[in-house]
Image: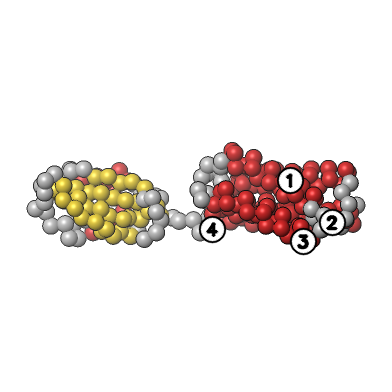
Amino acid sequence: MLDSLLSTSSAADTITLSGTITIILSSLALGLFISLIYRFTERERGASASFAVTLIMLPSIIAMIILLVGNNAARALSLAGAFSIIRFRSAPGDPKDIGYIFFTLGVGLACGMGYILYGAIFAAILCAAMVILTQTGYAQKKSGSMQLKIMIPEDTDFQHLFDDIFSSYTSSFRLERIKTADFGALFELHYAVMVPDDTDQKEFIDSLRARNGNLNITLSLKHTESW
């Protein structure tokens, strides 16, 4: 049984019904396993239901493509076409989602070539690594990048006006833009701030309001994480 799982005869030489069913079912099972790990690791961010289903289908699709290719030259051409489907997700997708797609493509390729056991080992090791990285919070930011807009009267000296408050409630801050508003009666200050997760944002805003004369203050998530 072990030798049959490690052999490539079913994929490279002849295609039998039993071998085809075994490969397809195996790739579907591995795809389901990867999809469950994806949902577990992305539960806080919000796992996409359609993407989770796609992860189940991809290994069997790639395995079938490889099964239907009979020689190495054609296999290389079909493999290039199979991996080009990554384009459908590359524009709007998260880098981690693209990584999961390559993951399922690799597992499907292993199954299609007959290396089912190797594909299962690869899936188990990489899924375990994803769970460990997620549970340990590897590379996750402790602070959120936010945009702060503060309105102040035009006769107020805004240089270093809020520095002490920022030092107490943010991990870093930078004045990015200044513009006049209300026909020059007000200044509109735009700051990029890094706010720790445990910061009391209401208390932070109340401190700023006491300093700017209770004028408008807007604190919002920044669209880009780059500084």
Determine which of the numbered discs, if any, sits on residue 12 in the image: 2
Measured Cα–Cα span from mark 2 to mark 4: 41 Å
Q: Quadrant of residue 20?
A: top right
Do the residues bearing badges 1 and 2 touch, measured as CB atoms within 8 Å? no
* Residue 117 makes an appearance in the image: no
Q: Quadrant of residue 141?
A: bottom left
Front position among marks 4 and 1: 1
Measured Cα–Cα span from mark 3 to mark 2: 12 Å
Residue 31 position, x and y percent, is 70, 46
Front position among marks 3 and 4: 3
Residue 164 position, x and y percent, is 23, 58
Front position among marks 3 and 2: 3
Determine which of the numbered discs, if any, sits on residue 73 in the image: 3
Q: Which residue is mark 1?
A: 60
Q: Residue at x 60, y 42 (%)?
A: 51
Task: Say which element carries label 3.
Answer: helix
Do the residues bearing badges 2 and 4 touch, measured as CB atoms within 8 Å? no
Nearer to the camera, 187 or 111 = 111
Measured Cα–Cα span from mark 3 to mark 4: 41 Å
Q: Residue at x 79, y 43 (%)?
A: 25
Q: Amino acid at mark 1?
A: Ser
Front position among marks 1 and 2: 2
Residue 76 position, x and y percent, is 73, 60
Crowd band around label 1 with a 10 angstrom C-alpha radius: few (<14), some (14–19), many (20+): many
Q: Quadrant of residue 177?
A: bottom left
Q: Amino acid at mark 4?
A: Tyr
Determine whether, in the image, residue 157 is placed left or right of residue 80. left
Sequence-earlier tag: 4 or 1: 1
Front position among marks 1 and 3: 3
Measured Cα–Cα span from mark 4 to mark 1: 31 Å
Measured Cα–Cα span from mark 1 to mark 3: 21 Å
Sequence-earlier tag: 2 or 4: 2
